[in-house]
Image (cartoon, rainbow, N blue to C red):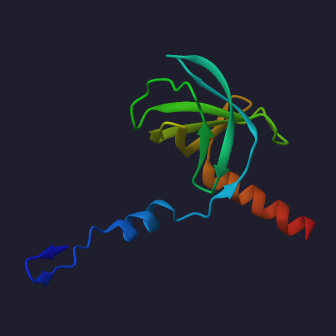
Amino acid sequence: MNLGNHTVFVDLGLNRQMREKRSSVRKPVRARVRITHSTFGVIRAWTRNISDRGVYVELREQPHLPIGAHIKLQMLDSAMPEIAFNMKVERTDDEGISLSFVDYEIHGERHSMESLRDIWQRQARLTS
């Protein structure tokens, strides 16, 4: 920014904020999902990207949910579509909604995301 004859550097912290928000690598994934909440029922949609921490879901007609609201998400194209992920709304924009993983449910039991990561890592070791 210029102030008279002096140039002043203003650190808005944008680069740090972007790094913090994107601590997990996002991979472009186009997959069918079903999201559910008591205020809107069931919506079928598509993912845009996914990471270890969350999912971006494309929604043209978005439900009005506050940041921090919890919804359920099922990945319909996965090997186990019966897994219901409990998700938290992180942000919304004109094209969709960004959700973070909280935990997951299968066969009426709730489990931590860490336990799912452990299962995937064990399976990966067995198949390699």
| Figure quadrant of residue 1 | bottom left
Residue found at x 54% / y 42%: 99
- Say which of 21 and 111 sits in front: 21
Residue 119: x and y in percent read 76, 56
Q: Quadrant of the C terminus?
A: bottom right
Residue 14: x and y in percent read 35, 66
User: Horizontal placement of 7 versus 86: left or right?
Assistant: left
Residue found at x 61% / y 46%: 55
Residue found at x 49% / y 16%: 39
| Figure quadrant of residue 30 | top right
Q: Residue furthest right?
A: 127
Q: Is residue 87 above or below residue 6?
A: above
Q: Is residue 111 above or below residue 36?
A: below
User: Horizontal placement of 117 versus 65: left or right?
Assistant: right
Q: Residue furthest bottom?
A: 6
Residue 35: x and y in percent read 63, 28
Count of numbered badges drawn on the protein: 0
| Figure quadrant of residue 81 | top right
Residue 76: x and y in percent read 78, 34
Q: Residue furthest front?
A: 5
Residue found at x 51% / y 62%: 22
